Image (cartoon, coloured by chain):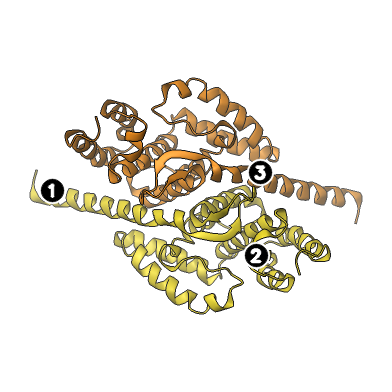
Chain colours: A yellow, B orange
Amino acid sequence: MNPLTTRRMETKLDQLQQRIDFIKAIDALKEVQRKTCLFSESRYENSAEHSWAVATFALTLADYAPSGTEINRVIHMLLLHDIVEVDAGDTLCYDEEGSKDKAQREQAAADRLFGMLPTKTAQHFRTLWDEFEAEETAEAKFANALDRMIPVLHNLDTGGKAWIENSVTFDQVIAKNQKIGRSSPALWNYLLPRIQRAHQDGWLL
Amino acid sequence: MNPLTTRRMETKLDQLQQRIDFIKAIDALKEVQRKTCLFSESRYENSAEHSWAVATFALTLADYAPSGTEINRVIHMLLLHDIVEVDAGDTLCYDEEGSKDKAQREQAAADRLFGMLPTKTAQHFRTLWDEFEAEETAEAKFANALDRMIPVLHNLDTGGKAWIENSVTFDQVIAKNQKIGRSSPALWNYLLPRIQRAHQDGWLL
């Protein structure tokens, strides 16, 4: 085998090792606990299984995305959206104190984790993650809408278990989640009366 | 609003409720324990977080799929491939006794779970799941290759923790995993010498 072919093969093998090292590193997402209970209420969920649920939710609710939305880019974003929590931890969206330095912590995590990958894939994944965070494209808006909607469904179904434990109020739930309606009015029309009912029933203050 | 419009809106709302009920039902996948340890060795993983890992692995290893493979169909299959375990449980691929009625148990689970969805989506998801199980298309072969590869990586990295606890032998590992090479020679060329080394080192008998 000539040296050029050998070097090409080595590079290909190095790149495979980089990808496998990335997968090993983000395995730690299975140990990041979120402030949302399973529907069964048996325990809090972790960010890895949440990422599966919300990506599968996107596949299941593809018809509720605005016309022209590329659902596969939504799914890619949702698979990657939380991996920065491996370094930065999960910050409850209602936690104003924790949210102050969240962006900075997550940017550093993104630099480290995506930086483990071969350049082209690193850039591709970072662009997807930045797009999700900026929430400007139709795909990023829909991905964020689903990411907000899932914990609302969990709370509505469990008598607000995680909301109550974290002292989350009706006004906060409305303020943080009404953006869902800008991406998908049908989804917000489903949620809003149920959130209002929880408030009227007295368990969401 | 005329009655036809009202009926159409109701149908759309019913369909949304069906989709949400499906997502609630498959949330139980977070409580199905697999026989693979986390890379950190802190505990066994569950099938929901595994599904996230292997779908993200597909996105990360897209370049290693045979030319022409539709990577998004691979990802869709991997998001859905294990949901039947909600009813049927996880069966270790080396468990010959448990594998006898596995297909029957999983078919019944697929009937129930996909049957919760509106007809068109139910058919779409069932077709993807059947395609994964049949392992005939390039997409299904690559999805299955990644699904086999991930537990091998976990075992190689943890001194064969789950293999040893489940009395899995070198011959079994080779027999069950060599199919990876039919879909992606590069991935099998990476794994094979590492599995052989584990055998030579004496911890994979």
Q: Earlier in the sequence, mark 2 or mark 1?
A: 1
Rendered position, B79 above or below A201: above
At a point 58% along the width and 77% down the height, the residue shown is A96
Indicate the quadrant containing the N terminus of chain A: top left, top right, bottom left or bottom right: top left
Task: Give the residue at mark 2.
Answer: A165
Please, what is the three-letter code of the amino acid marked with disc 2?
Glu
At a point 23% along the width and 50% down the height, the residue shown is A12
| Circle nearer the viewer, 1 or 3 | 3
A169 left or right of A135 in image: right
Task: Determine contact: label 1, label 3, CB under 8 Å.
Answer: no
| Circle nearer the viewer, 2 or 1 | 2
Task: Give the residue at mark 1.
Answer: A6
Please tell me how crowded label 2 is: few (under 14), some (14-19), or many (20+) other residues with Cα within 10 Å: few
Does dot 2 land on a helix, a strand or a loop?
helix
| Circle nearer the viewer, 2 or 3 | 2
Please tell me how crowded label 3 is: few (under 14), some (14-19), or many (20+) other residues with Cα within 10 Å: some
State which chain disc 2 sits on.
A
State which chain disc 1 sits on.
A
Does dot 1 land on a helix, a strand or a loop?
helix
